[in-house]
Image: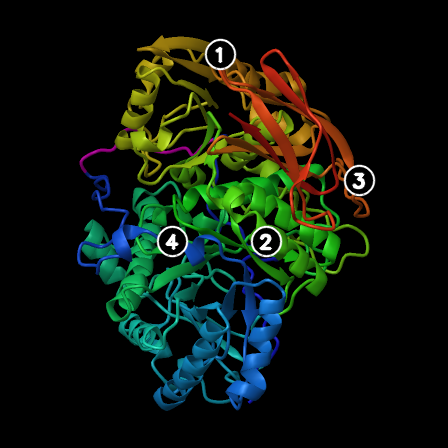
Amino acid sequence: MDVPRRMSRRGLLRAGLGVGGAAVVGQHLALAGPASAASPAAPASLPLDRAAWAAPAVRAGAFPEWSRFARLADGTFDEDADPVRDMKPVIDALKAQNVSVIELDTILSNWLTDQEFTQHVGKVRDFVGLAHAAGLRVVMYYPSMELISVGGEKGRSFYKNAQGKDWVQRSLDGKPNVFYGSLVVWVDPGDESCWLSPNSPWRDYYLGRVKALAGTGLDAIWPDVPIYFDGALSWCDGSSWAATAFKADTGLALPPKADFSSPAFRRYVEWRHRNLHQWQLDIAAAGRAVNPDLVTFVETVSMDYQYATLVGLDGAYLRTAEGVSQMWEVDILGNYDGMRHATATDWTCLISMYKYARAASGTKPAWAFSYGWKADDASLVMAELLAAGCNPYEVKSPFKNETTDKVMRTRMYAFVAANQEKLYTTTTAAEVGVYHSSASRDFVSPSPGTGMYANVKKPAGVKEWWSSGSAEESCSRQAWLGEFRGTVKALVYAHVPFVTVTSPGLTAADLAGLKVLLLPNLQAVSDAEAAVLRGFVAGGGTVVITGPAPTALDELGTARSEYALADVLGFRKGDALPDGKQNRFGAGTCRYVKSLPGHAYLDTADKAAGELLLAPVRAAAPPSVTLSGDDRIHLEMGRLGGDVVVQLVNFTGFGDVPAAFRTTPAACTVALAVPAGKKVLGATVSSPDAASPAPRAVPFTVDGGTVSVPLTVAQYSLLTVSMG
């Protein structure tokens, strides 16, 4: 049979589906006071690394080198494919494009009988053998909770004629999460899409097939988006399987409806994250039970924005899990336009997503989609991906098995291969962190819209856009996310190297090396989180916390009787809330700002608002690198041995309103502090924009303790300053 051209399983839902009708009151939820004896207990402290019963991870939890330096692309074959005639040309073509890992996407999205599946496993084995002979690795794409029945709307289908009706996810009012084609781009007209409950017997069905695939010699499994899909229904899973699991875990019955003022519903929101986390661990363990060297990369479509709340998949829960990381589906603005009509603020949103992806994957490889529509916008997107430290999966939007441009992919991947040590083994030089609070994302003013980007209005002539056009879909309208994204934008525009710090499982070690931690609109925190943050300040760190209710909620969104960090803040709930306050605590400092300066900076790049965030940063962590040039040059900095590696990405062609795509080379000067006792040995620049990815020497000057390097950046430059 012919395998149809696969469209990507894109998570953006264009009908403004929102948060299922949750009631929103004021700047934060109008919740009850302190939890009473009748309120749900705090969630059990479950390990976030792996299930207690799971098989050991690959050698001491270390991911293999091939996965850390991966350059990915899609490959496929027809069911009647001959290995030599049909499979080998696909492999050879991808190798010629400097691809190192093939994502094999065949017919596993479809409902297959046991016999059909077994026959297909043989084909997979043939492909893997040929790829390995060519020196390439193979990761197998396999949807983890969706099953498509081809022609199932009018013909036989998994939901109507097999186990689907019993195993399907259901909404809280009992409706089955099944729909027919054209609702989303990847389900063809006439086909059925059935979303299964991970707590049903689907679990054993799927894990058994994962084990069969693991026996083919595959290097990795790619489970696709394990989510409570909300394209047709909101707030799944309300099936009997989920009800039993929820009751066993929390002692509670499923809530009857979506209501963020209900403690039981907020507990359900939190439980869905942990339930899907365990499902991902089970998939990884199933593969390792057959092949201990097999690693798992879970396609994760929910990034730093509100979508994780809606579909239950919080990628940061996997941060410390062994043997399993993520393939991040980082979406762009338009299915058929890429980032061609972005605003500059939209580019900082993309930067935020890629940096979140890198952080949420911990020390493991962070694979990520690198979408594009034409060669020039695709290469700029990949530049931001590389600057964040992610591994590229280059693909033309919205198609899953097409390159945007073969020449561009070959050129960019040659650059990645030539500079992989600098891209993936440097140690960040950032002393500033931005805290991403999953609980605050979930429980601070839930509102319609995901907030994926800032500009919601589709530009003239563009076929599709990420939003339906409603203003409330913008991140600038999200109470927590807008403050977070605005904080990121302020740091990017100030050329301050920073890391994102994710919240699930936070430990003191996660803050090692940081001098400043920004806590945008941090309201919902657990006692354990608060203890880590308190220890960071007591040990000499500086925190900058903004917003009208600092640490006023617990991790389930329930109002606290007292701020969790009242001692660090220097005021209590009974005190008048100050507009701003600086408080010494232990050896460190807390800076509090009642307003939302990140929000103001996101919308207008207001300098006064930016200074409320940046002044404490400069005071506590004087920069060791500065850039003289346009604000819209993104700077990242790391160290590799005696080298300082600076990455520069130029998005100066973009302004406050969408305009035609253009690349405008930008002149700038990078100045680095030279440590005492060191001297500058040389400076080189590598760039995928050049004829060769090889480094070329560039002039520099040394004045006292500072080395300055003037550069012109087309799209992306990798500057290396060697010191000894």
The kind of secondary structure element at disc 3 is loop
* Disc marking residue 235: none
User: Pointer 4 and pointer 1: residues touching (CB < 8 Å)?
Assistant: no
| Residue 338: % across, % down | 69, 54
Mark 3 and mark 1: Cα distance apart in space = 40 Å
Closer to viewer: mark 1 or mark 2: 2
The residue that disc 3 covers is: 664
| Residue 598: % across, % down | 57, 27
Closer to viewer: mark 4 or mark 3: 3
On whether residue 35 falls in the magenta region, the answer is: yes
Mark 4 and mark 3: Cα distance apart in space = 51 Å
- Between residues 508 and 684, which one lies in front from this camera angle? 684
Residues packed near mark 2 inside 10 Å, few (<14), some (14 to 19) or many (20 plus): many
Q: Which residues are magenta?
A: 28-37
On whether residue 643 falls in the magenta region, the answer is: no
* Disc marking residue 257: 4
Q: Quadrant of residue 254?
A: bottom left
Q: Is residue 398 above or below residue 586?
A: below
* Residue at the image position 59 percent from the left and 62 percent from the top: 98
* Residue at the image position 24 percent from the left and 68 percent from the top: 289
Closer to viewer: mark 2 or mark 4: 2
Q: Earlier in the sequence, mark 1 or mark 2?
A: 2
| Residue 556: % across, % down | 32, 39
- Where does the N terminus fall, quadrant-wise? bottom right
* Disc marking residue 580: 1
* Residue type at tag 3: Thr
Q: Quadrant of residue 4?
A: bottom right
The residue that disc 2 covers is: 331
Q: Earlier in the sequence, mark 4 or mark 3?
A: 4
